[in-house]
Image (cartoon, rainbow, N blue to C red):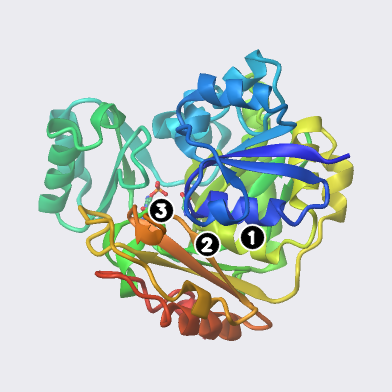
C-alpha cells in the first residue's frame, strides 16, 4: 500500500531524497517542508520551517502522512523526532538525545576517548584565556572548533598562532556562532585525505553505504574557508574493502555499542567524517544525519527503493532488508555551485539559467539547494545554490559529464570548484 511521505528541509540533500523517494512505487503523496524550487517540481512544498516541529507534526497528522523524514542536523539536535513521537507519528531518525553525538563535539570527543575510537587528541575549553594558553603550549597547526552546531562553519584550521588567536576571538569573544561557541574543542591537526562514511541503523543492525568524499574548503586546491561542502564523489576509488571493514569494526560498531551502553538508542543515519592518516583512519566528527552533498551522490548510486531503507530503519528490520541493498555500478559525483562570497556574506535574488540544457545529458541531474521562484523566475536564495550531479562508468566520465553540465549553468557571481574528485583520478 502506498504511504504519503513528508521530507523536512530545503537543501540539496532534501531535493535528492525527494527525487529518489518519488521513484518509489510505494510513495503516495510527497511533501517537502519548506523545500526549494527543485522540490516544487516533484513534490508539494509546504511553507513550514524546519524548526517548527509542532506545526510540522500538526500538518503530518492532518494529512495522514505515513512517514516523516527530516534532513537537517538542527532539526534532529532540536528534537524533531521526539516531538513527532510524542504525537504518535511515524518518523525516521535519531532522537534529541542520540543526536548529541553531532550536537556536542565535546560529548562526541568524550565518547571516542572513552571507547578508544581513533580520533585527534583534544582538549575542551570554556574561557579564551585557557584556550589561548593551550594553543601556545601546543603550537601549530592546530584545529579550533565551536562545540555546538554552526552550519558547518565553526571549524578553524589554524596554521599560525595568530590565526588561532583570531579564531578564539571570533568564536568566544565576538560570539560569531553564538551559544555554539560557549565551549570550544581544540584538537591536534590530522593530515591526510578526508572521507565520509554513512551507516544506516535501526538501533540494532547497521549497513554501510559506499565511501564518499566531500570537498569542504571553498576554493580549488583546498584553499579558502571551510564550507558546508563544495562537491562529492562516491565511491572513493582508493578506499578498499579492507579499509571499510576496519572502519566498521574500529569506528562504526564501537560507536553504536558505546551509545547503547549509555542507554541511548540510535536509529537513523550515523555519518562519521574521517581523515585517512598515515596511522590509519581517524574520526574528525560525527554527524547524526545524511551529508549534504553526500546524499546527492548516494541517491544517484542507490538502486534499492529508498523507502524500503527508511522503513527498515524505523521498524527494526534492517537486518533482513539491509542485506539486499543494491547499488548501481560506476561512480556518482556532485559539483556544488555557490553564490559569490559564500561561505561569507553573499547576495541572492540573481536569475539562474541553463538547468534544462544541463539536464539534456541523461546522466545528469541538477539538485537545487538555495533556489526559489520569484514571479515565475528561478532565482538564487542561498549560499549553496545548485548541485550538479552525474553518473558514469568511471570517475573521470562522471566528472566530465558533471563539469560539461556546470558550464551550461549561469547566474551572477556563481562559483564552484574545478577540482572535485581530481585527487582520486590518479
Ligand atoms: P568538522 O565539522 O569537525 O568535520 O570539521 C570541518 C572540516 O575541518 C573537516 O571536514 C576537516 O576538513 C577540517 N578538520 C576538522 N578537524 C580537523 C583536524 N583535527 N585536523 C585536520 N582538519 C580538520
Ligand atoms: N558534507 C558534509 C556535511 O553534510 O556535514
Q: Does the residue tagged 3 have its C-beta within 8 Å of any atom of ligand 2?
A: no
Q: CA separation, marks 2 and 1?
A: 13 Å
Quadrant including the N terminus: top right
Q: Please name whichever residue, 222 or 229, is drawn nearer the observer in this view of the structure.
A: 229
Q: Which residue is mark 3?
A: 372
User: Who comes first in sequence, dot 2 or dot 3?
Assistant: 2
Toward which corner of the image does residue 202 lie, by quadrant?
A: top right
Q: Say which residue appears at 37% left-offset and 55% top-offset.
A: 375
User: Who comes first in sequence, dot 2 or dot 1?
Assistant: 1
Question: Mark 1 against mark 3, which lies toward the viewer?
Answer: 3
**Relative to 222, 328 lies left or right:** right
Q: Which residue is mark 1?
A: 298
For mark 1, does the 10 Å Cα neighbourhood hold few (<14), some (14 to 19), or many (20 or more) residues? many
Q: Is residue 192 above or below residue 323?
A: below
**Relative to 336, 118 lies left or right:** right
For mark 3, does the 10 Å Cα neighbourhood hold few (<14), some (14 to 19), or many (20 or more) residues? many
Q: Is residue 31 above or below residue 412?
A: above
Q: Position of residue 210 (x, y in %)?
A: 67, 61
Q: Position of residue 233 (x, y in %)?
A: 55, 69
Q: Secondary structure at mark 3?
A: strand
Q: Secondary structure at mark 1?
A: helix
Q: CA separation, marks 1 and 3?
A: 24 Å
**Relative to 339, 173 lies left or right:** left
Number of on-image labels? 3
Q: CA separation, marks 2 and 3?
A: 13 Å
Amino acid at each position: 500500500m502506498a504511504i504519503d511521505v513528508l521530507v523536512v528541509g530545503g537543501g540539496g540533500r532534501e531535493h535528492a531524497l525527494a527525487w529518489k523517494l518519488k521513484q518509489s512505487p510505494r510513495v503516495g503523496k510527497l511533501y517537502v517542508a519548506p523545500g526549494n524550487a527543485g522540490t516544487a517540481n516533484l513534490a508539494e512544498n509546504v511553507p513550514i520551517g524546519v524548526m517548527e516541529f509542532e506545526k510540522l507534526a500538526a500538518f503530518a497528522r492532518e494529512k495522514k502522512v505515513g512517514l516523516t523524514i527530516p534532513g537537517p542536523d538542527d532539526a534532529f539536535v532540536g528534537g524533531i523526532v521526539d516531538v513527532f513521537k510524542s504525537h504518535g507519528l511515524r518518523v525516521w531518525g535519531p532522537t534529541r538525545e542520540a543526536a548529541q553525538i553531532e550536537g556536542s563535539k565535546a560529548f562526541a570527543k568524550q565518547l571516542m576517548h572513552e571507547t578508544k575510537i581513533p580520533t585527534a587528541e583534544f582538549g575542551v575549553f570554556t574561557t579564551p584565556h585557557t584556550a589561548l594558553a593551550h594553543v601556545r603550549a601546543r603550537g601549530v597547526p592546530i584545529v579550533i572548533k565551536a562545540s555546538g552546531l554552526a552550519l558547518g562553519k565553526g571549524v578553524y584550521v589554524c596554521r599560525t598562532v595568530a590565526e588561532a588567536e583570531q579564531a578564539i576571538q571570533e568564536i568566544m569573544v565576538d560570539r560569531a556562532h553564538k551559544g555554539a561557541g560557549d565551549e570550544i574543542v581544540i584538537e591536534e591537526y590530522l593530515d591526510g585525505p578526508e572521507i565520509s562514511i554513512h551507516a544506516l541503523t535501526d538501533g540494532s543492525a547497521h549497513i554501510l553505504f559506499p565511501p564518499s568524499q566531500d570537498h569542504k574548503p571553498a576554493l580549488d586546491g583546498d584553499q579558502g574557508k571551510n564550507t558546508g561542502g563544495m562537491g562529492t564523489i562516491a565511491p572513493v576509488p582508493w578506499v578498499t574493502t579492507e579499509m571499510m571493514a576496519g572502519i566498521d569494526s574500529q569506528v562504526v560498531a564501537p560507536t553504536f555499542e558505546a551509545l547503547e551502553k549509555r542507554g541511548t538508542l540510535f536509529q537513523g543515519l550515523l555519518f562519521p567524517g574521517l581523515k585517512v592518516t598515515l596511522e590509519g583512519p581517524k574520526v574528525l566528527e560525527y554527524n547524526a544525519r545524511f551529508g549534504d552533498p553526500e546524499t546527492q551522490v548516494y541517491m544517484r548510486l542507490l538502486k534499492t527503493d529508498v523507502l524500503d531503507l527508511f522503513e527498515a530503519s524505523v521498524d527494526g528490520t534492517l537486518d533482513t532488508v539491509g542485506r539486499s541493498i543494491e547499488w548501481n555500478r560506476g561512480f556518482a559525483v556532485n559539483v556544488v555551485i555557490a553564490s559569490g562570497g559564500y561561505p561569507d556574506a553573499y547576495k541572492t535574488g540573481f536569475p539562474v539559467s541553463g538547468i534544462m540544457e544541463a539536464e539534456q545529458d541523461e546522466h545528469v541531474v541538477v539538485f537545487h539547494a538555495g533556489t526559489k521562484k520569484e514571479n515565475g523566475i528561478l532565482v538564487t536564495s542561498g549560499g549553496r545554490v545548485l548541485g550538479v550531479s552525474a553518473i558514469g562508468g568511471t570517475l573521470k566520465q562522471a566528472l566530465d559529464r558533471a563539469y560539461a553540465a556546470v558550464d551550461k549553468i549561469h547566474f551572477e557571481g556563481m562559483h564552484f570548484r574545478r577540482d572535485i574528485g581530481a585527487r582520486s583520478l590518479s
